[in-house]
Image (tube, rainbow, N blue to C red):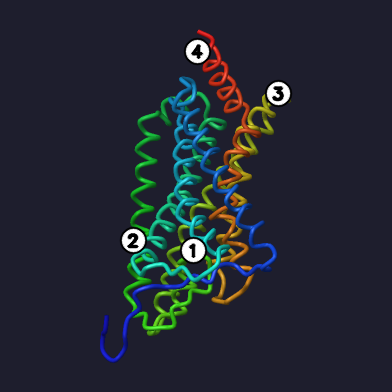
Amino acid sequence: MERGNYTLLTEFILAGIPYPLKLRTFLFLFFLLIYILTQLGNLLILLTVCADSQLHVRPMYVFLGILSVIDMGISSIIVPRLLMNFTSGIKPIPFGGCVAQLYFYHFLGSTQCFLYTLMAYDRYLAICRPLHYPVLMTTKLSLLLAAGAWVAGSFHGALQAILTFRLPYCGPNKVDYFFCDIPAVLRLACADTTVNERVTFVDIGVVVASCFSLILLSYVHIVQAVLRIRTAEGRRRAFSTCGAHVTVVTVYYVPCAFIYLRPETNNVLDGAAALFPTAITPFLNPLIYTLRNQEVKLALKRMIQGSGKKSEV
C-alpha cells in the first residue's frame, strides 16, 4: 500500500526476547508449560467460583472469576506468539494482527487495573464497614461495576490502538520486542511520535496512578481496621483475604510502572519486566488465590468431594 512517496508496511516481525540458542528447547517447553498451567489454573478458579453456591453470590469472588477470564485472555494474546520466538524461521505478524494484539492487551490490562481497584474497595467495605457491607456491595452492584471496568478498559485500549496506528509505518518492520506494544511499535513510525508518547504517558499514568492510589488508600484504612480487631484469629482471617490481593497488585503494578512511566529507552530489562504482566502474573494469580485464601481452598475441597460422591453413585 502506498501513501505519498513511501510504501506502508503490511506486516511486522517480532524480535522476541534474546536468549542463548542452547536454551531454545528448554525455554519453549518452559513457557508452554506456563501457558498450559495458566489456562488450567484460571479455569479451575472460574469453575470453582461458578459452581460453589457460597462464592458466586459474593462480590469479591465475582471479581475473582472475572480476573481469571482476563488472565486467560492476556496469556492467550501474548504467550503463543512468544513461543514462536523459540522456533526456527521468521514468523511475521500481519499488520492487522499487530493492531489487534496491542488493542486487546491494553483493553484487558487496563480492565485488570480497574478490577484490582474494585477488589480493594470491596475489601475496604467488608472489613471497615461490615454491618453496611451487604447493602453497600450487592451482587448486582458488583456486576455493574465489573461491566463498567470492561467498558472503560475497552475505551482505553481503543484510544491507544488508534493513536499508535494512525501514524504511517514504512520500514523497517522489525519490532524489537516479543509482542506489539506501544513503545516498541512507535520506534518504527515514519512520523513524529512526540504527541503519542505524551498522550500514552498521561493516559497510562492516570490509569495506573489513580488505581494504585485508590488501592493504597483502601489498604491504609483496612490495616487500621484490622489492627483494631482484638482476636488473633480475626486478624488472621482479615489478612488472609487481603494478602493475596496485595501480592498480585504488587507483582502487576511494579513492572507496568517500570515499562510505561519513565523516559523512553530501549532497555533489555523492558522485555524481562513485560514478562510479568503478560505471562508470570496470569500464571501466579490462581496459585496465590488458592494458597493464600482459605475460602477458595475450602470451595475447591467441596467441589472435589462433591464430584467424588457423584462418581461413587
Q: Label 4 to label 3, Cα distance in Å?
A: 35 Å
Instruction: Label 1, secondary structure: give it.
Output: helix
Q: Please tell me the numbered disc located at residue 233.
A: 3
Asked where in the image residue 97 lies, by quadrant, the reply is bottom left
Left or right: 221 as drawn, with respect to 48? right
Residue sitting at x 36%, y 52%: 152
Residue 26 drawn at (x, y percent): 66, 56
Q: Is residue 265 above or below residue 221?
A: below
Binning the other alpha carbons within 10 Å of mark 1 as few (below 14), some (14 to 19) or many (20 upward) gives some
Work out whether mark 4 precedes mark 1 in sequence or the reverse, and give the earlier one: 1
Work out whether mark 3 precedes mark 1 in sequence or the reverse, and give the earlier one: 1
Hey, what amino acid is under mark 3? Glu
Work out whether mark 2 precedes mark 3 in sequence or the reverse, and give the earlier one: 2
Q: Is residue 78 above or below residue 193?
A: above
Residue holding disc 4: 310
Residue holding disc 2: 158
Asked where in the image residue 271 lies, by quadrant, the reply is bottom right
